[in-house]
Image: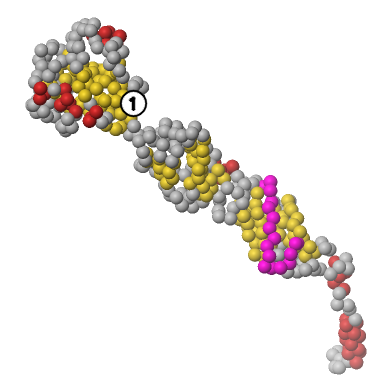
Amino acid sequence: MFIKNSPLLWITGLVCLLASCTQKPDDFKDFLNGQELKYPGAITQTFTRPGNLRLGIGWSPSPDPSVTKYRIYWNNYADSTEVAASTHSPSDTIFTVIKGLQEYTYSFFVHSFDKNGNRSIPIEIQNARVYGATYRNSLMNRPFNLTDPYKLLNDNGNEITLNFLAADSTNTITYIRYISTADEQKEISLPPDQNSITLNDYKYGTSVAYQSYYTPNRVALDTFSVGLVDTFPNIEFGIVKCDKSLFREVNLPYDVGAYEGQTSVSKLWDGSNGPQGYPNIFHSDGNSSLPHHFTFDMGKAYDSLRTLEVTGRDCCHNPVEYEIWGIADITNAATSVPGNDAGWKDDALAKGWILLKEVTRSDDGKGPYTVNFSTETPRIRYIRMRIKRVASGDNSSSNLSELTPAYKK
């Protein structure tokens, strides 16, 4: 049966309402062992600075004056380090360096703590990279300019400009090490915004080494050197023609004579280009049967004679089989038998002459034809050319237009 507006129902409801109003607002502490849950203020504005097996971490401190320290966690909270709260001004920066890390990309969590051990909500720092041997092994020294690596600025070779390509954006410096003219090892630096550098006291013939340094980014704690020191290409002068203005005829015993005065040996360094016609040539006198020889003085001794360009006449009697001899001093160097004597070669060697090259050509001898000498060629001032066979088959005549010796400078 339905009871309408029952006084008993109203009384029961009122008692329950009064009972509920008497519960304390902090009764939830029963679940917290009587302690109020507090969260100290968290940090803001985090940043990192990568390093070599270490990492710099910084942040703007919590403005909460109750914060006494911070703790940084990594490796899923397995590792941590503590940093004192030295300031509470958000305009300041707290910075610390964590050492002993692996080369890896980490995530860190930073908590603020008060004196009672209450900690803030975590602030996560993601993608914090630490560098090490793998990064270093990926680095390469700044490349030099392969097509134009260096330029020698004077004849002594002690002034030289080294040329490099543009530097990588993370390159900080390249150190160049060389031997000076005072026989001292020196080191100079090439900044990344500079593509060339000049050495004013370089000892010619010595090696130049270089090593570059890099940083992972512009705020990194450490710079990393390339693991290997590279060496610049051998620095040396190129092949340079000898100064023909110094050349002179030498008439040693048994040297072949000229056909006439205007076809003398001196025609061989008059500067003509290509095969010439009579009388702008050297023409032997026809009185000395092959093999015969002539000699000339280059006017100075060369330590590194490297080539001789031989240009024949435009038609005939061009040498196609011959020997090139050299010597530094002709004192007592005259051979005692003619060039066609079977004992001539032994006699020449006994007098100090050096056989620089034996040449056999398969063409008509007109040239120009470049004869290359050994890099071990000794000091040479005088050249003797012993002609053994000519293209025409003649047994006593030989013709040439020009001889151009050159040396490594």
Q: Position of residue 336 (x, y in %)?
A: 23, 7
Indicate the amino acid at tag 1: Ser
In this orientation, which residue lies closer to the viewer: 250 or 372? 250
Badge 1 density bin: few <14, some 14–19, many ≥20, Cα 10 Å: some
Left or right, residue 143 beside residue 402: right
Tally the numbered discs.
1
Q: Residue at image x 61%, y 51%? A: 221
Q: Which color scheme is applied? A: secondary structure
* Residue that appears at 73% across and 69% down: 63
Label 1 belongs to which residue?
Answer: 304
Residue 108 to residue 389: above or below: below
Residue 120 vertical placement versus 269 (above, below): below
Instruction: Tell me what residue is drawn at x 23 percent, y 26 percent.
Output: 247
Disc 1, SS: loop
The quadrant of the picture occupied by the N terminus is bottom right
**Residue 307 falls inside the magenta stretch:** no
* Dominant secondary structure of the residues highlighted in magenta in the image: loop
Where does the C terminus fall, quadrant-wise?
Answer: top left
- Between 369 and 227, the residue placed more toward the observer is 369
Q: Is residue 175 shown above or below 370?
A: below
Q: Position of residue 15 (x, y in %)?
A: 91, 85
- Residue 287 percent coordinates (x, y): 10, 12
Residue 70 horizontal/vertical position (percent): 75, 60
Is residue 357 in view from this perspective?
no
* Range drawn in magenta: 85-101
Query: Which residue occupies 11% across, 21% down?
Result: 283
Q: Is residue 348 visible?
A: yes
Side (left or right) of 364 relative to 335: left
Q: Residue furthest front?
A: 331
